[in-house]
Amino acid sequence: MEGDYLKLPKFGRVYCRVSRQPEGQFKSVTLSQTPSGKYYASCLFDDGKEKPKQSADGKAIGIDLGLNEFAITSDGSKHGSPKYHRKYEQKLANKQRELSRKQKGSNNRRKARVKVAKVHEKITRCREDFCHKLSRNLVDENQVIVVENLTVKNMVRNSKLAKSISDAGWGQFLTMLKYKAEWEGKTYIEVDRFFPSSKTCHHCLHQVDSLPLEIRNWECLSCGTQHDRDVNAAKNIRDEGLRILRVRNFEETSKCKTHSRQAAGRVAAASGQRVRPAKGTAFGGIAG
Ligand SMILES: [Zn+2]
């Protein structure tokens, strides 16, 4: 790579727009072409840095993925559903209509097809941009990120919502959250056990029998807490993730305790005691 040029085998020097100056040692390059005819080269570099060690000490956040709002977090903020789709929907429909009027096999049809592809790509890029920014903020501000597993989520939903779900780009969003968290030694957890995150009061764990989708706010009959439907769900997701972490932590420390006991008897057992975290220390600040 030299400035704005990329040296490729067989092609020679090719002008390109560089999104980010890479560091480290060049490994490989992958070329791709989009349906509208643009070329992309993605280069793999090894920066020689090791992945940071994962830690779970710090702020935890639960994220509920929604349809009215794209994502709702346990701290009460709502991240609006991306509006780009509605904005470009009309444009897409127009271009598709133009395409259908063109004669098959004609040059004009080919041009119209490229125009449709361009709108599709615009939508994709807007969605990516939205997901990148939101996942970046969430990872920067939190140490532990808990989300619902999508297969569970989709099972709960009915098929009418399926289109909106794929439009919402949840899968892509979760992938971004995961790798961004891993890059920075943060903890990403998917809660895959089915549990009624919406219908359970996060405060006293009382469960209501039914909570139709149109009910956005409710009061817990048992403890009287006022709930915003989605924020309550996000809090339950966070708490479930923290519970999983505690179990994991406990398993790891008891494993290491048994191990060191076998290895060096009483002395090691004592150090095993020390690494075991006091109950609730890591999460004391955020459990409430
Ligand atoms: Zn309650």
Image (cartoon, grey):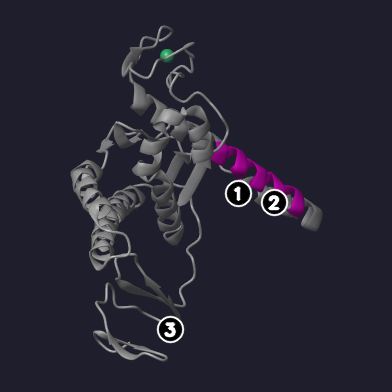
Q: Select label 1 or label 3 by which is in front.
A: 3
Badge 1 amino acid: Val
Quadrant of the image occupied by residue 264 = bottom right
Q: Are marks 1 and 2 in contact (CB under 8 Å)?
A: yes
Q: Select label 2 or label 3 by which is in front.
A: 3
- Magenta segment range? 244-259
Residue 217, label in figure: none
Q: Which residue is label 2 attached to?
A: 256
**Label 3 neighbourhood size at 10 Å, few (<14), some (14-19), many (20+)?**
few
Q: Is residue 254 magenta?
A: yes
Front-most of residues 115 and 188: 115
Counting every numbered tag in the picture gives 3
Badge 2 amino acid: Cys
Q: Residue at x 56, y 29 (%)?
A: 194
Q: Residue at x 30, y 70 (%)?
A: 37
Front-most of residues 223 and 210: 210
Q: Which residue is label 3 attached to?
A: 26
**Label 1 neighbourhood size at 10 Å, few (<14), some (14-19), many (20+)?**
few
